[in-house]
Image: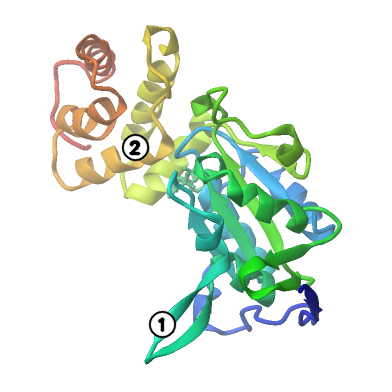
């Protein structure tokens, strides 16, 4: 049997109070108008898809927005073994008693958190059955195992991310799912912004950070050589962190950028050539 549990609809409940320890906002440098767009979507309670390549700032953006909107954030990294029950919850045996444990999605729905499902297409297909009634006007979560339906807290919002670059026909988002969300498109930040991000996150000087970004730009342009995805902002930050700790620029780029991107020998050589062009034979560490 299904019945409706009244959700606590007091707006703002669970929001971090002024002066609480998480007062520090995550660092996020906007590229375009994604902040007002997300805010408007949130206030209209429109579910949001963040589309874009890996490591370009989607997760950081949602962390920043949750903080800005004063909502808790519950993040779930989706993978091919993620079942709907992992999101909803399950019965557990505790001291000979069967107790129900809410999953992350149920917690978000009850408490009015922002629920971020990272790489949604990786999840099992049965998760869409759960997502659909939550992302239309019903805003309802069905818990079959408990015969319960929960009306989402009025502050709840579903946000998912999706990397169009990875997708095959088999692993694409169905129209019936994608047309329940508004979409924000993410790209790698422009060179000036990306250098500022790399410098800020790794502590690298801005000139070297800019060179890493220029190298990434060249790598991102060689898709036709078989590279499925360009060097992410995240990898540039990793390279910056290694350089800051005294590893040579060439070795840092090889370890943090070239090797993670591909196992293909010829592609590696192309990447190394691009790197040598950028930094020359000279490698005297960070300036
Ligand atoms: P994604 O979720 O798209 O895979 P992330 O949000 O994890 O990528 O981004 C990787 C890292 O890059 C972040 O941890 C952050 O350090 C940095 N980053 C990327 N874009 C930005 C940005 N616009 N502002 C601040 N940091 C950023």
Between 261 and 219, the one nearer to me in the picture: 261
> Residue shown at 39%/24% (left/top)?
216
Asked whether the beta carbons under mark 1 and mark 2 sit within 8 Å of each other, the answer is no
Let me know if residue 212 appears in the view.
yes
Quadrant of residue 274 within the rendered picture: top left
Q: Mark 2 points at which residue?
A: 235
Farthest front residue in view: 1
Quadrant of residue 233 within the rendered picture: top left
Query: As displayed, is residue 74 above or below residue 129?
Result: below
Q: Position of residue 104 (x, y in %)?
A: 54, 67
Distance between the alpha carbons at the discs numbered 1 and 2: 43 Å
Let me know if residue 28 appears in the view.
no
Residue 165 as seen in the image, left or right of residue 183: left
Q: Where is residue 176 in the image (x, y as percent from the top left)?
A: 76, 38
Q: Position of residue 23 (x, y in %)?
A: 55, 75
Query: As displayed, is residue 213 above or below residue 108?
Result: above
Q: Which of marks 1 and 2 is in front?
A: 1
Between 233 and 151, the one nearer to me in the picture: 151
Circle 1 crowding by C-alpha within 10 Å: few under 14, some 14–19, many from 20? few
Q: Mark 1 points at which residue?
A: 93
> Residue shown at 43%/7% (left/top)?
224
Q: Is mark 1 within 8 Å of ligand 1?
A: no
Residue 39 as seen in the image, left or right of residue 233: right
Residue 239 as seen in the image, left or right of residue 65: left
> Residue shown at 17%/48% (left/top)?
245
Q: What colour scheme has been applied to the protein in the rendered image?
A: rainbow
> Residue shown at 68%/69% (left/top)?
109
Query: As displayed, is residue 203 above or below residue 228?
Result: below
In which quadrant is the N terminus drawn? bottom right
Instruction: Point out which mark residue 69 bears.
Output: none
Quadrant of residue 249 within the rendered picture: top left
In which quadrant is the C terminus drawn? top left
């Amino acid at each position: 049997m299904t019945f409706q549990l009244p959700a606590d609809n007091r707006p703002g409940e669970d929001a971090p109070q002024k002066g609480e320890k998480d007062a520090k906002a995550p660092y996020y440098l906007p590229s375009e108008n994604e902040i007002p767009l997300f805010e408007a979507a949130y206030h209209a309670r429109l579910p949001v898809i963040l589309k874009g390549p890996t490591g370009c700032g989607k997760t950081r953006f949602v962390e920043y927005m949750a903080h800005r909107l004063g909502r808790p954030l519950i993040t779930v990294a989706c993978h091919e073994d993620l079942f709907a029950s992992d999101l909803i919850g399950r019965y557990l045996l505790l001291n000979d008693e069967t107790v129900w444990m809410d999953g992350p999605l149920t917690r978000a729905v009850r408490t009015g958190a922002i629920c971020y499902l990272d790489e949604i297409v990786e999840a099992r297909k049965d998760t869409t059955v759960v997502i659909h009634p939550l992302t239309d006007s019903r805003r309802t979560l069905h818990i079959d195992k408990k015969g319960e339906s929960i009306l989402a807290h009025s502050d709840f919002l579903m946000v998912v991310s999706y990397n169009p670059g990875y997708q095959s026909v088999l692993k694409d988002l169905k129209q019936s799912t994608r047309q329940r969300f508004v979409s924000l498109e993410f790209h790698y930040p422009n060179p000036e912004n990306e250098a500022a991000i790399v410098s800020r996150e790794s502590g690298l000087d801005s000139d070297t950070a800019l060179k890493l970004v220029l190298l990434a730009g060249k790598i991102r342009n060689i898709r036709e050589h078989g590279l499925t995805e360009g060097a992410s902002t995240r990898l540039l930050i990793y390279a910056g962190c290694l350089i800051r700790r005294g590893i040579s620029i060439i070795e840092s780029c090889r370890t943090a950028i070239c090797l993670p991107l591909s196992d293909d020998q010829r592609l590696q050589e192309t990447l190394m050539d691009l790197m040598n062009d950028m930094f020359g034979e000279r490698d005297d560490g960070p300036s």
